[in-house]
Amino acid sequence: MSTGEDEERELIAAVRNLLTQPGGLEAGKEKSAAESVGTDLPPPSPEEDVREETVPEVAAPVTDEKNEQPEQSPVQAQKGAGIRSFIETVARSGDAAEPRVPGGKDPVRALLNRIGRGKEGASTPTVETHDVRAEAEMSADLPAAVEDFGPEADVPAPSPRHHGPAGILDRMKGWREDTESSTPGSGSHIVEEVDDPGLGGEVSDGVVTVDELGNLADLILPKSATFTIDELNINRNEHSFDFVDNARVVSEFDDIFSQSLSSASLAAAAAQVATPVEEVPQPRFGFLKMFQVPKVGAVVEEYNPTLHGPLVDLAMRPSPGIEEIELYPVNEPYAYVRVTYDSTTHEYTYHVIEPMLTPGERELFLEIKERLFETLCITSRDLTHDEARKALRDAANVIIADYGIRLDPLGREKILYHVEKEFLGDGLIDPVMHDKYIEDISCDGVGSAIFVYHTTYESMKTTLVYQDHVALDSFVTKLAQRAGKYISIAEPMLDATMSDGSRIQMTLGAEVTAHGSTFTIRKFREEPITPTDLIEWHTFSPLGIAFIWLAVENAKSCIFAGGTASGKTTTLNAISLFIPPLAKIVTLEDTRELKLPHPNWIPSITRDSFSQDGRGEIDMYELLRAALRQRPEYILVGEVRGKEALTLFQAMSTGHVTYATMHADSVASAVHRLENPPIDVPRNMLSALNLMSIQVQARIGGQRIRRNKQLIEILDIDPRTNELITNEVFRWHPATDEIRYSGKSYILEQIMEDRGWSEERMREELKRRQEVLEWMRIKKIRYFKDVSKILVSYFRDPETVVQRVRADLYGEGGSA
């Protein structure tokens, strides 16, 4: 057997032993590749009789001065030293992260080339010159070869477009084939360059798509569902249903919905709600005995708009350049809103129209207000709104009777309205709080106009202004007390939740805000958004909602990411209606926003500390730890922004289905936020997530819209580059304002395998759910309890629901 073959076998065997030896490649992590590879060759192994010497410019037969024995030929010495130096370097350096030199020759390739040249020169003895420059390049490139064996974990993963060979054996095989196919003696060898993103290339974002992987995706991932799915498009003008009696439409599903209450526990609960225990009636308004209620002969005449006329004057006085855009009631018949447009400034203005008091009526109102402060003692929390309103009006009527003042029903009603607004309402901003089209209310200080954010006209200035700092400070303090919180000059900033669920941020005085007290209210919708609304507003396509419906029903976790006011929490609340009706749900929030119709639901919120040292504080992390002990099936988190995210992903890994929101505009930015402080979630835990929905707020035709920008599947982690593999299922195209299906889904394929469905069965199921969603949109079934009743009915008896839906959509036959 020739010497070249022996050395080739020695190289392959040595590298194979290093790869199979446990911990072999990690033995030298403390020593960098630059330290292990220098100008001197590595120390020889004691088992081999090879001595270190200086190589001359021209290789000639050399004799050892000590032993007087001929050494190996220069070719053999050079090959042996290269083989052993490479093996020793790999053994010592391990995963050293020395940047590779672009364009340099790989040492393994150089060794194999010299082995090939050794074979050719075995029959014809030649004298070769020692190339010092080539050896220097080989030594400089050794760290790159070491890096290919095992990249250190701290080094960023390479870009998806630059992937090196999978292993050393594959590389050796490829290089041997290239060497054998090259022309002997030509001296030109093909060297493959692998760009390093750390040297001026693209920095990896930690995310790679399935399309970028190409054929490698089939080796890493399971099969995906690539069949075509028909998207249901029903012309909105073709069907004209009777939208008036929605209660009758929903009641048709009572027989199916009642099956969801078949369990003993729910039946008992429903019985208790339906037939409450009779209690002995007790007087609720005993405090009124202190007042002298008017006698029967002095009965107060109730106000009737038809008989006594309107309380407000809705006529608009013409003004140059001012145009009335819209006029609508917010608290009829007391308060209205007029939106005007100024053609000179090109601005909209929000006018609040309320009953105006005459000077005498205002003086009487102030006197009644002072008397009520002195005499009225009642806790409105124990009463309903109607009961509290009746008690307050009766107390005000007693005071008016004590003064012996006779008022006509119109004047009395105006005074009583302002009394109710001051004691039970929200004072100056009470009409704005009644406006369902207002999202945000902002007061910037004393003397500054209050601004609102309208769903149609966006940010507008109102005609409401706090002129007195005492009144503004009093109102801010009252808001804090109603929320069960405390605000003072010592602690002038406060975040709280109002009684209707709206979020409020307040500052008191001029300590932290120069213009005085401020407040910002983000209004809470009394009726939550439903999937019907998301389809009606084109936030999602019907096929996209049907896809999410299937994913939620089959326990797939999802994170809704996006910017501020992009609809993250709104979408989270809407898709929660797809959760099975009897599943146990735990929601975790800083402020109450989520509202679910499920009976087995535990809503929990955080709590601030009672003292300066932080004792008694319950943060999101503590709530999540407690929630995991409650054995929930679904966990909904309002927003993840801290260490609770790690616990959330641990819950995903242990089988809990979780839904949450976070601020991020793409999957890559979400991964960066999750992996870095203060969240610090390891990347290998991110694969427990199934879906990520990217929400965006954009403008089309000058109108602000919210769209689902992307719906992305989180599939796995690439074992070669440690990058997260994703697949885009739906994408929004701004040019046409369409949300299109990509044609490939791994989650649908997994659901098909879990349920034993065929492709035809999956197509039919998606079509059915689209039909149910479109039917609810056309029928204008948008109240969340009604939508929930339809969804639960489909969960219980899908065949009956689909039959009724198709009968309405397609006629008596009930088929498309």
Image (cartoon, rainbow, N blue to C red):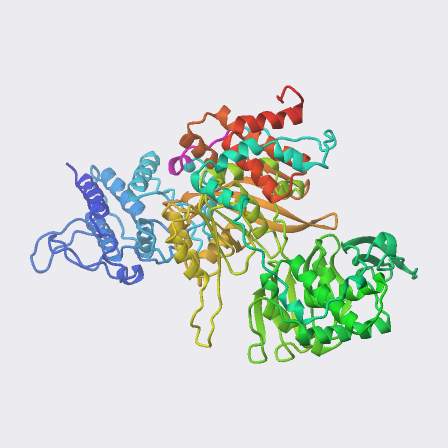
Say which quadrant the N terminus sits in.
Answer: top left
Q: Which residue is painted at 63% across and 53% down in the image?
A: 525
Q: Is residue 788 left or right of residue 476?
A: left
| Residue 98 place in picture, x, y as percent | 35, 58
Quarter location, residue 643: bottom left
Q: Is residue 629 left or right of residue 478?
A: left
Q: What predominant SS class does the magenta segment belong to?
A: loop
Spot the residue most to the left: 67
In the image, which residues are magenta? 218-227
Task: Count how many numbered circles sit on residues in the image.
Answer: 0
> Does residue 95 belong to the magenta stretch?
no
| Residue 248 place in picture, x, y as percent | 66, 34
Q: Is residue 391 left or right of residue 87?
A: right
- From this view, report whether residue 753 is shown above or below residue 628: above
Q: Which residue is painted at 70% across and 36% down in the image?
A: 245
Spot the residue most to the top: 813
- From this view, report whether residue 146 is shown above or below residue 180: below
| Residue 715 place in picture, x, y as percent | 43, 42
Viewer can see residue 722:
no
Say which quadrant the C terminus sits in.
Answer: top right
